[in-house]
Amino acid sequence: MATDEFVNGKHPRNFTAEERREKSLASKAKALVGEPIDADDPSIWHEVDEPLTSRQRKIIPHALRESDRHSPLLWLKLREPGTDRVIRCRGRYDHISGTWFAGFSDVENGDDTGFAVSVIAWAPMN
């Protein structure tokens, strides 16, 4: 009978809360596929307050379809989980819940997934 190798010799169900949190943050950072922001980046960034002001909320674009509650795909500027580095990644804004989601791709097959993030700024994708 073969034995499986696990992180630190522990099965995931035996991880402590801190180990689960570290694994979660690592997987989220990997899912972001975040990239550093180039100094020559031509994007026009819009600052984000927490909570959003009504003026900030009004300038976030709506999706083309009337039934879609999310914005079109946007660039999001946020802090990389576990570091102080600022990165950009793809994401959307949910106009109903007021939540930013990162980790989206521009694939048209409907398999986009995302998770809630705290955003510093957003920019339209050109």
Image (cartoon, rainbow, N blue to C red):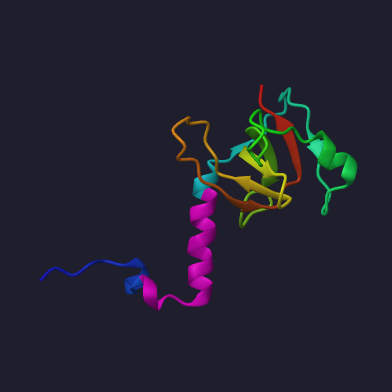
Q: In the displayed structure, would residue 37 be above or below residue 5?
A: above
* Percent x, y of residue 100: 68, 47
Numbered range of the magenta stretch: 12-29
How far across and how far down the image is residue 13, in percent?
38, 75
- On screen, residue 69 versus residue 4, left or right, reads right
Residue at left 65%, top 32%?
72
Q: Quadrant of the C terminus?
A: top right
Foreground residue, 59 or 91?
59
In the displayed structure image, the side of residue 25 where residue 120 appears, left or right: right
Query: Where residue 19 sits: x, y (%)?
Result: 48, 71
User: Does the magenta portion include 102?
Assistant: no
Screen quadrant of the N terminus: bottom left
Q: Residue furthest front?
A: 67
Which residue sits at x=66%, y=26%?
A: 125
Q: Residue at x 71, y 49 (%)?
A: 96
Q: Is residue 14 magenta?
A: yes
